Amino acid sequence: MRLFYLVFILFFLISCKNELKREVFDNKNGMTSIIKKKPEVDFNKVKLKSEEAFQFCKSKGFNTDFCILIDMSLHSGIKRFFIWDFKTKSISKRYLVGHGCGSNPWSKDYSKDSPKFSNEDGSHLSALGKYKLQGREYSDWGIHVKYLMHGLESTNNNALKRFIVFHSWDMMNDEEIFPNGSPEGWGCPTVSDNAMKEIDPMLQNSTNPVLMWIYN
């Protein structure tokens, strides 16, 4: 009987190890929390979006060398900001990107895996849809560079009115921080300063507008 219990306990421990979620003890707060398994990027989804993006860019006179795809269905602690290379048909760069905080406290990560979206002024939420990146200006944030985001759909056409722009933020990380999330601002897609230093020359050297597509 004792051997049976030992075998049962061993089997139980192995099963728990393979669970998608595991419990960990938070010594700081003295409580048990749930840590989720790190989500994986669905590359088939990205590829399908890229194919639609290419047709859109081709028909609208946008840059057909690359575009920016942001998958907001992914946890904000993993790299969900993709530079898609139309020529190689692959992701050339990946970065962390923040989203809007909504009614939650600014700069925290309360909605890291379940953000809400809105096109309403004052909502402090990000808006889904295709944007035309055109217009480089001074920013008070990050490396002091921002790009104007012209919303092209009914879901995001208030972007300029809402002062939603693409900029960097020194609170953003370069590397993935899952299970923590990226800090949430007032709706702008924000990347790290180092990320913007890489992206900015690409946008500056583009003779045509660049597509940024934020989807869920």
Image: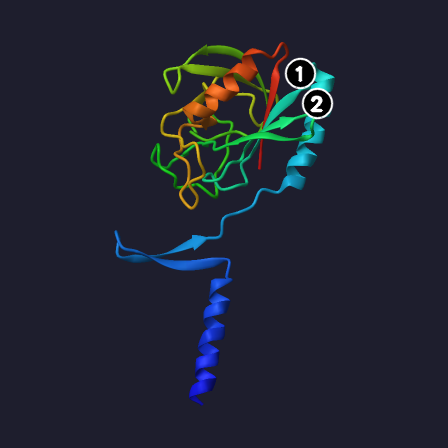
Q: Which quadrant of the structure image shows residue 6?
A: bottom left
Mark 2 Cα within 10 Å, few/some/many (few <14, many 20+)?
A: some
Q: Which residue is mark 2?
A: 56
At a point 49% along the width and 30% down the height, the residue shown is 126
> Which quarter of the rendering shows the N terminus?
bottom left
Percent across and percent down for residue 127 are 52, 29
Which of the two residues, 31 or 158, is positioned nearer the viewer here? Answer: 31
Q: Can residue 160 be spotted in the picture?
A: no
Q: Is residue 86 left or right of residue 200?
A: right
Which quarter of the rendered picture does the C terminus lie within? top right
Q: Is residue 3 visible?
A: yes
Using the image as rendered, state which of residue 89 and residue 100 is in the foreground.
89
Q: Position of residue 174 (x, y in %)?
A: 43, 32
Q: Kindly identify the residue that appears in the image at 46 percent across and 16 percent down.
A: 146
Please give the name of the residue rendered at 47% of the width and 66% of the height, measured from the top-left corner.
16
Residue pointed to by mark 1: 62
In the image, 178: left or right of 68? left
Mark 1 Cα-neighbour bin, 10 Å: few <14, some 14–19, many ≥20: many
The answer to whether 195 is drawn above or below residue 22 in the figure is above
Q: CA distance from mark 2 to mark 1?
A: 8 Å
Residue type beneath disc 2: Phe
User: Residue 201: x, y in percent?
Assistant: 53, 15
Do residues under tags 2 and 1 come within 8 Å of each other at their CB atoms?
Answer: yes
